[in-house]
Amino acid sequence: MKKLSVGIVGASGLVGSRLANLVADKLNCTITLFGNKSANKKMIVGGKVYKVQCVDSLVDHPLDMVGFCADNQVSARWIPLLTQKGVVCVDNSAHFRLHKNVPLVVPGVNDSSLPKSNLYANPNCTTIGVAMAVAPLVKQGISSLNVVTMQSASGAGGDGLEDLCSRSSYGKLKAFAHPIYDNVIPQIGNILPSGYTTEEMKLQQELRKILSLKGIKINSFCARVPVTIGHCAVVTVKLKNKVDVTQIRQDIALQPNVLVFDNREQNVYPMPLMIRQTKFVGVGRIVKANAHTVNIFVVEDNLLRGAAYNALEIMEKVAKTWLE
């Protein structure tokens, strides 16, 4: 594989810094870091010191691939300019995820026939973990899904972590409308006329696209909880086939990068504390609710598995398949 030139936009952020270090470790490449507020600052990536370049200079650099870990506006502005030049972009923002001709990819779930493209979208952090856990059940015929999430403060970025760790209250909050310390906020994103939030709609629409569940009823409710890193979800799956918990447990355990922790006698189940800083999705509390319905508990590191590592796996596959 040839040595690639890879750019990371939003390199100083919680996800961007993780992606930069993963790329430095896993890809045969040179790296250029880009940022806005962090421009001209120095960062250590893979044991080397890099100077962050201003994002406005992005199109002036000879790049093969760029990972975007910034907001929708940054992606909307720069990605079209780069793809026109033949640069492959992997975008962690929500801007392109539901575009018809943009692959929305969870490696190991829907990448078996990954099309050649100059743009790949990285799904929402919660969507990735749920998709990986539920994918093995698609072959049994899914009639409906209900997902209730408990999402950590880091899902709102560095400001979210600061609100939690500083125990910020009204007047000092940076990320949330209400204090997150010792509290639960039953809203992530803006509330739409339907009553759902933008986060809840992302989850529904992205799961349909990734798992090819067009027309399947998906209900969701997303809450913010006072945890630093680690998103959790209670997923209720209604199947066309009758529930066989033993078979479901075995099928989920075969899914790449999914670990099953499910021993009720020993109080073993996945938690953010045990899955944090890993590439794995933890699944447990697999419970038969009725003849055709099963409940499962899903946990992931939202910054690593739910963002940076998924993006890295897309970049690795594209580099091996299209850029050799």
Image: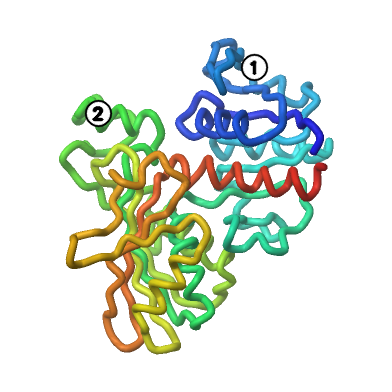
**Image position of 120 with respect to 205: above or below:** above
Tag 1 residue: 53
What amino acid does circle 1 point to?
Gln
**Image position of 222 with respect to 61: above or below:** below
Q: How many marks?
A: 2
Q: Earlier in the sequence, mark 1 or mark 2?
A: 1
Residue 165 circle label:
2
Residue 286 circle label:
none
Image quadrant where one finds the C terminus: top right
Quadrant position of residue 48? top right
Instruction: Name the residue located 56 percent from the left edge and 34 percent from the top edge.
Output: 22
What amino acid does circle 2 point to?
Cys
Left or right of 66, for residue 123: left
Q: Residues within 10 Å of mark 2 (few under 14, many from 20)?
A: some
Residue 281, percent from left and from top: 42, 54
Instruction: Name the residue located 24 percent from the left edge and 59 percent from the top edge.
Output: 268
Q: Residues within 10 Å of mark 1 (few under 14, many from 20)?
A: many
Quadrant position of residue 116? bottom right
* Secondary structure under the numbered disc 1 in the rendered image: strand
